[in-house]
Amino acid sequence: MKDSVQLKERLVKHIKETTDRRLVEIDTALVQAQESANDDTKSSAGDKYETSREMIQQDINRLQQQRAEVIRELDIINKIEQEGTEVGKLGALVVTDRFTYFLATSLGQLVIDGNKYAIVSAQSPIGKQLIGKEKGQDFEFNGIQQTIKGIY
C-alpha cells in the first residue's frame, strides 16, 4: 500500500485527538462531581445527605476508572510503531478482502479520504484473530471468512 506510513500517521493522530478529548471530558466531569460533593457537604444533613453523598462518590469512582482506562489507551497509542510490518501486531494496517483494520485501541469505524477503517484493539476478538497473521492467510470472524490481502 502506497503511503501506508502517512496513512498510519493520520490514523494515530485522529485516535490521539479523540482520546485526548475523552480525557478532557472526564476531567471536567470529575471537577464538577467534586464541586457537587463539596456543595452537598455544606448544605445537607441526615440520611438524604448520606445517600446523595454516596451517589456522588460512586460517580467520582466511575469517572476515575474511566480516566485510568483512557490513560492506558494513550499509553498503547504512544507505543504504536508507524513503520511498515508484514505481520499483524499493534500498529499494523491489515487489509482483507472485506475490511481494512488498524490495530490500535477500540475506537470503531473511521473514514479518511472516503475509505473506511475499523480501528480495533489488539485485545478485542477481531484483534486477537489478526495478531500474528500474514498476507495470504485466511481467518473467520462472526461467520465471515476473510483473506488478508496485505499488512502494512
Image: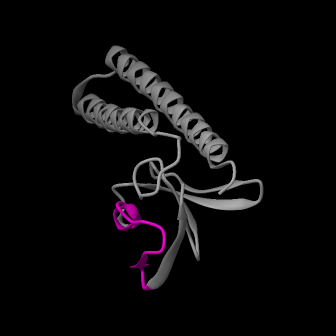
Residue at the farthest top position:
42
Q: Could you tell me residue 127's position as x and y percent?
A: 39, 61
Question: Up-down: is 84 above or below 47?
Answer: below
Which residue: 40% across, 18% down? 39
Measured along the vertical axis of the image, is residue 139 above or below residue 102? below
> Considering only vertical position in the picture, is 133 above or below 10?
below
The question of residue 67 being in magenta is answered with no
Give the mark count.
0
> Which residue is rendered at x = 53% and y = 31% of the image?
20
Horizontal relation, residue 38 to residue 47: left or right: right
Residue 33 found in image quarter: top left
- For the N terminus, the image quarter is bottom right
**Looking at this rendering, what residue extends furthest in the right direction?**
113
Please state if 106 lies on the left or on the right of 43 as rendered: right
Q: Nearer the viewer, residue 62 or 137?
A: 137
Pick the residue in front: 86 or 114.
Answer: 86
Q: Quadrant of the C terminus?
A: bottom right
Residue 43: give x, y in percent of width and height: 37, 18
Residue at 23 percent of width and 27 percent of height: 46
Q: In this rendered view, identify the residue nearer to me: 144 or 4.
A: 4
Look at the image and give the residue range highlighted in magenta.
126-143
Query: In the rendering, at what x and y percent does residue 112 appear?
Result: 71, 52
Q: Is residue 35 above or below residue 151?
A: above
For the point 47% across and 39% down, the residue is 81
**Left or right of 37 in this view: 21:** right
